[in-house]
Amino acid sequence: MASDTVRDIVIGMSDGLTVPFAIAAGMSGAAVAAKIVITAGLAEIAAGSISMGLGGYLAGRTDVEHYDAEERREIAETEDVPEQEAAEVVAILRDFGLDENQSASVVGSLRKDRAKWVDFMMRFELGLERPDPRRALQSALTIAISYAVSGFIPLAPYILVNTVTTALYISVLFTLTALFVFGYVKGRVTGLSAWRSGWQTMLIGGVAAGTAFAIARLI
């Protein structure tokens, strides 16, 4: 569960830092007023949070629906073709080093309890764990909140400073620092090189914002 939450925070913050940063930088390149940058940024944060949160919710619901569908199939197979399912159990146990007599004992026990038999097949044949039915909503909220919170980092300077150019410089400093820290922490959590992850995350966000700024200037 903790790893799932970390994954959701990473998903939300990755886009939450990068997309509003690129939009704010792009609009700054178009030399618009700070109020317009703020309005566009807030609209993007709201839309992005809803979109990303909905995506997380649908992904969570898909996991539940997929598990339920596979569980119904396994129930049907243990009822319709029990000998074939028993043979599959033996094959799985053989991979774990159990001999024929040991496997026969396990199969006999499983056949007496259909629920445990189905659970065994779900875990060891299909590699599926029953998902938490609350996971979809939790995932949606975690992603949406992470997106919104991180989205205010590049936007905050425009709210606090009236001059767009000054706000842009502060936003670049704040956001690139936040991107590096976020990438560093992500690297530590995922077991990757923390420094490399930090620099890569900062580079990606910087390129996105720089490209948006350059395009706006050219147009």
Image (tube, rainbow, N blue to C red):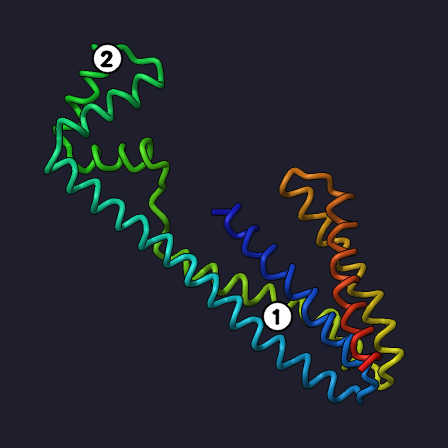
Report the number of discs: 2
At x 32% / y 51%, what residue is drawn?
66
Question: Which of disc 1 and disc 2 is earlier in sequence?
Answer: 2
Q: Secondary structure at mark 1?
A: helix
Give the residue pinned by disc 2: 102
Residue 57 at what x, y percent from top left?
A: 43, 63
Quarter holding the C terminus is bottom right
Asked if 209 appears above or below 68 in the picture, the reply is below
Residue 100 versus residue 145 in the image, above or below = above
- At mark 2, the secondary structure is helix
Residue 73, by quadrant, is top left
Report the side of 54 relative to 172 (left or right).
left
Vertical side of 26 occupied by 204: above or below: above
Q: Tell me the residue that label 1 is attached to.
A: 148
Q: Toward the viewer: 65 or 159?
A: 65
Q: Nearer the viewer, mark 2 or mark 1?
A: 2
Question: Residue 206: x and y, percent?
Answer: 79, 62
Nearer-the-camera pick, 128 or 26: 26
- Apparent side of residue 169 relative to residue 119 in the rendered image (left or right): right
CA–CA distance between discs 2 and 1?
55 Å
Query: Foreground: 167 or 75?
Result: 75
Q: Give amino acid for label 1.
A: Ala
